[in-house]
Image: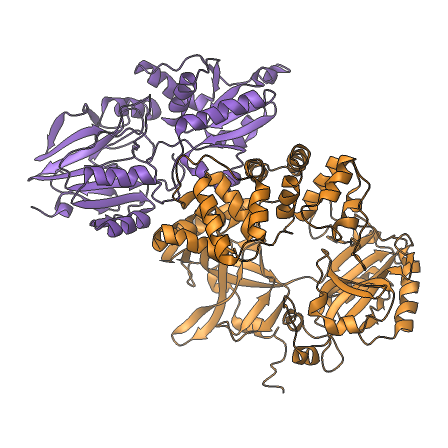
Chain colours: A purple, B orange
């Protein structure tokens, strides 16, 4: 069989496919042809000549960047295949956010799978991860690639939030969530846990919540958390309520206007207490859209590739693990994906 | 353990001081004795569990997880207890959380080997949060932003008493503090300090910051320093001690009340008096002057002291206050009267281990300023200013006493390496090694001269961290080397208190108390200081000048 790095190789602009002449999730500058695994800003950038992605990802990019985010686009459903200069490309669900996909690249009998970002636990807002059989090279993300990251049961974390709301009815719970994926998942999980009151959302979440609704993900009653500052005492109506917004917003004036705010943050990083403390979080919620250590290692065992490539995150530990397992592994050291924040 | 680990977690995540006091007081109110007493002992650092140390915990973890994976994780997390609590392969379905009193009492009675097995067994049973609390508990050093002082404030709040009352009796109490809690609950009288020669809580001074240095609300206009109102003394660079000799018992305490008598039998032997005095513990140099702090450091933190050490590094106390004389408590007297009593006392006792801290004549502000910046000996850090009418009160009251230190030395150095921090700064590059220029074999080169991990604000830390990440040229484990050439490098203005010769460092010198004073984003790296600038500050070389 041909050498895998003839089909895909790391370059400063991202993972490049020489025979197909395309990049997967290019990180730097505009390229002629991009295959985009999902809509998070560090993977899906605007300005490429041509973008191939799932219809949901294209919709997300259009919502974020405007309709003209690329010269031309091509939507590809999960499981459908296209040929690009003789290289076959298809998508398999990644379970990360709505529309997220693993990019499967095939050429001369060699099958390589680039996971993009993924997780294995249940997410009522997107299709679950589907492992691809007969994968020769598995290119895995490693955001939480350290054995200290073992995300607890997600329902338990949602219960923690609801308990806190019950225990401190006089405080406003400000829940930091990433605008794409985490926000809608947390909202949906709150609904599943029996919380049907109105949830208040920051402006940065509105478009994407609407987009999820349009794709059949019912989120229940949502209202804008915008305050009419002229109205005295208007903020009182938020007391005891849950407000969701990007974590950055909670540290500035926006967050301080709410009565007795209790800062929460839903992220895999919250598993490390000192991280929570640094971000000024009083109620850490360990809810992640990335695979934790056990999910990463279980997935590699399940896919059982001939070779494991590891990208963005803590690559060294997964390489060490592979070595202990007797697996061939290689860190890609691609730069440009957010190391810590987009989660 | 459940209530205690919940408490620790909420403490670490609660930023406000009052919030922490409320959490602590709530815990002491709601938990029964002796559980709360053991909790208190952990919080104040009074619990010493022999045999189970940080190294033990690390070894237990490495028996279960590949050491390389452990090291990578520890580098990332930056806190041993947190790393182990997260990485420990849990046994699902454990059905029992051991109560804190069981954990402590069993461990205190266990041998080293038993201790290890017990801790491993509990770590199996607990969830990450409980594991973290257990490890913090058995290894000490909580680093959760709660000082012993804050904990005592919470006790005072719980019992509705003055914090000074707690400090006063604290050193006569032992964990699990049942008599203390009985008193605070209102079911018993205040426990009497039952140790002889007890510690008296000390009075501390605020640093004097002048308006021209920093225009903040706590800054002072030096014009308020009226020579008629204030006395001035030299501020020596030793350690603050309280020497108490009462009814045949002699003790030397640090300013936090730790008993260090056993380390200084030479001083103890010279305490032939009935009194409690406050002063600076110093080492005498052969020429009759005060030896550098380095010499004192050689005698600190030792369990035993050899005869030779006592001969070559004789310790003594330079007394600056007297709190009790015979049966009489002098603390309510103004400083002017205490000073007269102290002078007479030192004269009468005539011990070669106790002398009098001289007063510095206060004439004009300009004269004081000169004294402060050009003290007569390098072992003097600056001045202490004390109001003549100040009574001796516990704590750090604002106004009666000020410490006015000499301006620090400054050097412009270039950032060379950065390491991830620990505790609340884990994941930030916050430990910075810096160097200055010297002539090397291949031209100008940077030689490391020190390491600093504070002095900057949180905002500046973010910028420094960003600089490190964007300018990394090499990595060695948790350490990153950054670009540092004449054309491209970050200049740090480093403040420090003094220099010593050090054969252990490549540059041959070691800085005292270095910190980042300013980040010189504006200054080209080529214009940073040269090693010769620092060498002029070194004390005479003992080899060159025998």
- Residue A85 in sight: no
Tell me where residue A227 sits by quadrant. top right
Q: Considering depth in this image, is A340 or A147 the residue closer to the camera?
A: A147
Q: Is residue A183 above or below residue B492?
A: above
Can the viewer see residue A300?
Answer: yes
Among the 4 quarters of the image, the one containing residue B6:
top right
Residues B173 and A245: in front is B173
| Image point (48%, 69%), residue name | B437
Residue B292 position, x and y percent, is 67, 73
Report x, y in % for residue A50.
20, 30
Residue at (87, 65) in percent of width and height: B274
Residue at image position (49%, 27%) is A160
Q: Is residue B506 left or right of residue B470?
A: right
In the displayed structure, B187 sits above or below B286; it is above
Numbered disc total = 0
Query: Is A26 on the left or on the right of A184, as rendered?
Result: left
Extreme residue toward the bottom, this view: B546
Residue B101 in the image: x percent, y percent? 60, 43
Across and down, in percent, residue B105 comes to: 59, 48
């Amino acid at each position: 069989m041909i050498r895998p790095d003839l089909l895909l190789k790391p370059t400063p602009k991202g993972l490049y496919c020489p025979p197909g002449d395309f990049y997967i999730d290019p990180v730097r500058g505009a390229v002629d042809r991009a295959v985009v695994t999902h809509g998070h800003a560090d993977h899906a950038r605007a300005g490429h000549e041509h973008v191939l992605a799932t219809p949901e990802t294209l919709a997300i990019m259009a919502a974020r960047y405007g309709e003209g985010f690329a010269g031309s686009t091509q939507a590809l459903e999960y499981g459908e295949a296209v040929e690009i200069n003789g290289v076959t490309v298809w998508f398999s669900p990644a379970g990360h956010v709505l529309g997220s996909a693993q990019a499967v690249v095939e050429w001369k009998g060699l099958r390589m799978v680039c996971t993009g970002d993924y997780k294995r636990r249940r997410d009522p807002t997107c299709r679950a991860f589907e492992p691809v059989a007969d994968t020769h090279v598995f290119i895995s993300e490693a955001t939480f690639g350290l054995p200290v990251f073992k995300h607890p049961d997600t329902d338990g974390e949602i219960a923690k939030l609801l308990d806190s709301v019950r225990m401190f009815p006089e405080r406003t719970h400000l829940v930091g969530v990433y605008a794409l994926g985490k926000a809608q998942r947390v909202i949906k999980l709150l609904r599943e846990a029996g919380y049907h009151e109105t949830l208040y959302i920051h402006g940065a979440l509105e478009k994407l919540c609407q987009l999820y609704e349009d794709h059949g993900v019912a989120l229940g009653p949502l209202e804008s958390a915008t305050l009419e500052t002229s109205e005295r005492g208007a903020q009182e109506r938020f007391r005891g309520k849950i407000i969701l917004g990007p974590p950055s917003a909670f540290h500035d004036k926006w967050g301080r206007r709410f009565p007795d705010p209790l800062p929460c943050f839903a992220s895999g990083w919250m598993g490390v207490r000192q991280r929570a403390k640094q971000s000024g979080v009083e109620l850490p919620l360990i809810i992640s859209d990335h695979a934790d250590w056990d999910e990463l290692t279980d997935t590699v065992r399940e896919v059982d590739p001939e070779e494991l490539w590891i990208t963005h995150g803590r690559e060294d530990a997964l390489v060490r693990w592979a070595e202990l397992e007797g697996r061939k592994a290689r860190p890609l050291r691609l730069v440009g994906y957010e190391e810590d924040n987009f989660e | 353990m459940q209530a205690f680990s919940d408490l620790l977690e909420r403490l670490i995540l609660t930023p406000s001081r009052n919030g922490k006091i409320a959490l602590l007081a709530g815990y002491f109110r709601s938990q029964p004795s002796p559980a709360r007493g053991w909790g208190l002992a952990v919080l104040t650092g009074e619990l010493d569990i022999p045999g189970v140390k940080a190294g033990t915990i690390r070894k237990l973890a490495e028996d279960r997880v590949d050491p390389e994976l452990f090291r990578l994780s520890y580098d990332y997390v930056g806190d041993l207890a947190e790393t182990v609590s997260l990485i420990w392969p849990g046994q699902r379905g454990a059905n029992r959380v051991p109560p804190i009193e069981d954990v402590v009492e069993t461990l205190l009675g266990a041998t080293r080997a038993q201790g290890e097995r017990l801790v491993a067994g509990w770590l199996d049973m607990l969830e990450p949060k409980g594991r973290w609390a257990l490890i913090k508990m058995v290894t000490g050093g909580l680093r959760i932003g709660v000082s012993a002082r804050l904990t005592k404030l919470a006790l005072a709040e719980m019992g509705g008493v003055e914090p000074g009352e707690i400090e006063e009796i604290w050193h006569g109490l032992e964990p699990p503090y049942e008599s203390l809690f009985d008193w605070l609950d209102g079911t018993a009288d205040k426990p009497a300090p039952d140790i002889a020669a007890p510690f008296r809580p000390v009075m501390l001074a605020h640093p004097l910051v002048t308006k021209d240095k920093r225009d903040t609300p706590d800054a002072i206009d030096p014009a308020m320093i009226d020579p008629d109102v204030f006395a001035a003394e030299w501020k020596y660079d030793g350690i603050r001690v309280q020497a108490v000799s009462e009814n045949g018992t002699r003790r030397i305490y640090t300013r936090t009340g730790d008993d260090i008598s056993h380390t200084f039998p030479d001083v103890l032997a010279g305490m032939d008096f009935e009194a409690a005095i406050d002063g600076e513990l110093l080492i005498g140099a052969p020429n009759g002057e005060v030896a550098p702090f380095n010499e004192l450091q050689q005698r600190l933190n030792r369990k035993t002291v050899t005869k030779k050490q006592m001969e070559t590094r004789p310790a003594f106390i330079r007394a600056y206050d007297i709190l009790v004389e015979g049966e009489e408590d002098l603390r309510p007297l103004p400083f002017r009267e205490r000073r007269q009593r102290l002078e007479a006392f030192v004269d009468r006792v005539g011990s070669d281990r106790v002398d009098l801290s001289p007063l510095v004549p206060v004439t004009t502000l300009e004269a004081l300023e000169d004294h402060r910046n050009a003290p007569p000996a390098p072992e003097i850090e600056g001045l202490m200013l004390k109001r003549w009418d100040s009574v001796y009160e516990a704590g750090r009251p604002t106004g009666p006493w000020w410490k006015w230190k000499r301006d620090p030395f400054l050097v412009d150095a270039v950032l060379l390496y950065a390491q991830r921090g620990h505790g609340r700064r884990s994941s930030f590059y916050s430990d910075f090694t810096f160097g200055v220029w010297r002539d090397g074999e291949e031209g100008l080169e940077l030689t490391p001269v020190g390491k600093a991990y504070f002095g900057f604000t949180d905002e500046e830390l973010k910028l420094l961290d960003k600089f490190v990440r964007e300018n990394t040229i090499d990595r060695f484990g948790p350490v990153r080397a950054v670009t540092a050439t004449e054309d491209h490098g970050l200049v740090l203005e480093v403040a420090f208190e003094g220099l010593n010769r050090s054969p252990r460092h490549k540059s041959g010198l070691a800085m005292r108390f270095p910190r980042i004073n300013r980040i010189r984003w504006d200054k080209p790296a080529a214009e940073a200081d040269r090693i010769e600038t620092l060498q002029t500050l070194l004390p005479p070389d003992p080899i060159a000048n025998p």
